Amino acid sequence: MSHLVHALGHIKINTSDIDGVVHDATEILGLHVTHSEAGQVWLSSNGRAAELVLIKSPENATHTIGLEALTVEAVREAESRVEAAGCRVLSSEPSMECIKAGVTFATPEGLRFEIHTPIRDGIYDRRHPTRGVGAGRLDHANLITPDPDATRRQLTAIGGLKLSERMVNDSLSWMYGGNRQHHILGIVKGVVGLHHYSFEFREFNDYLKLGDLLDRFDKQMLWGPGRHRPGDNTYAYYTDACGAMVECAGQMALVADDNDFEPNVITNLARPGNVRTMNVWGTPAPQEWREFHFPFAKIA
Ligand SMILES: [Fe+2]
């Protein structure tokens, strides 16, 4: 069992504007609220009990990146590796009642992860009435770390994540888990934070709905639609009410032959000449996207 972590499990965000983020998540992405209590709202795009978790807070910042392992044993195995990887266990209890087991840990770079068992799911509860686009599932997240090499080593040592691709200067790299999609985590080099979280769209027409819905709410796409080279997924980005960047992604390429897979190293870094190395249709990333930063909450 080399991959302990299978997929991105959930994203927890501290926000001073829960109502605003719920509005954007329901009316634009098409998520639905599954649970609401004092100071906390869970949202999901399908039958899972939670994918996006909002925590009422004076700040807008990423609280935790949830990574899903398949069994309680896998979670406990990951927990047993945390200290040796130079990280610190913050809790050995699951953070929500919709998961059986979890371990939350902090990295020296200031990231907080919870490796947890699968979130409770209703398999035939995938679609819900919505005026939003109707994303299908939480897909991946790109975190920002000052030390990508350290973060990757920790994620490999603790969760068995593997490198799928990297830029030779480590400004961006990508890691895959047990579900084999090209990345469940992207690693961006910079001040600790979250670059974006991503939900999967079902079809390309969804980008038309997205653009028109954003316009109706006097918002706009930050970049896209286009197709990334790393991952081969289509994309469009916008920012939500708390200032986090949301990606709407098409289905990603899979690492189908794990044993013979060699992570690609992108050596052509010179813009704009490398545009098709990075983006299949030749649409370059705007500076706003390249320099985007949403903070990570300070860890006590
Ligand atoms: Fe992405």
Image (cartoon, grey):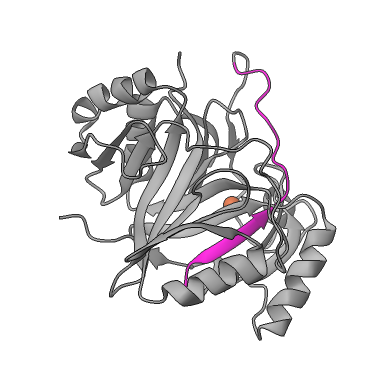
Farthest residue toward the right? 205
- From the viewer's perspective, is 162 left or right of 114? right
Eyeballing the image, is 122 above or below 211?
A: above
Query: Which residue is rendered at x = 60% and y = 23% of the image?
Result: 262
Q: Total label count?
A: 0
The structure residue drawn at horizontal position 66% and vertical position 83%, both measured from the top left corner, is 217
The magenta region covers: 243-258
Looking at the picture, does residue 198 appear above or below residue 97?
A: below
Question: Residue 204: x percent and y percent?
Answer: 82, 55
Image location of residue 231, percent across then percent down: 66, 41
| Rendering coords of residue 242 (x, y %) | 45, 73
Q: Nearer the viewer, residue 56 or 148?
A: 56
- Residue 169 in view (yes/no): no
Q: Image quarter for residue 71?
A: top left
Tell me the residue at 61%/28% (across/down): 180
**Quadrant location of residue 66?**
top left
Does residue 67 lie above or below 70 as drawn?
A: below
Q: Nearer the viewer, residue 124 or 287?
A: 124
Examine the structure image and report whether residue 224 is included in the region drawn in magenta. no
| Relative height, residue 35 to residue 154 (above, below) | below
Q: Is residue 202 left or right of residue 146?
A: right
Considering the image in quadrants, where does the C terminus appear?
Answer: bottom left
* Horizontal and vertical percent position of residue 92: 22, 34
Q: Residue furthest left?
A: 300
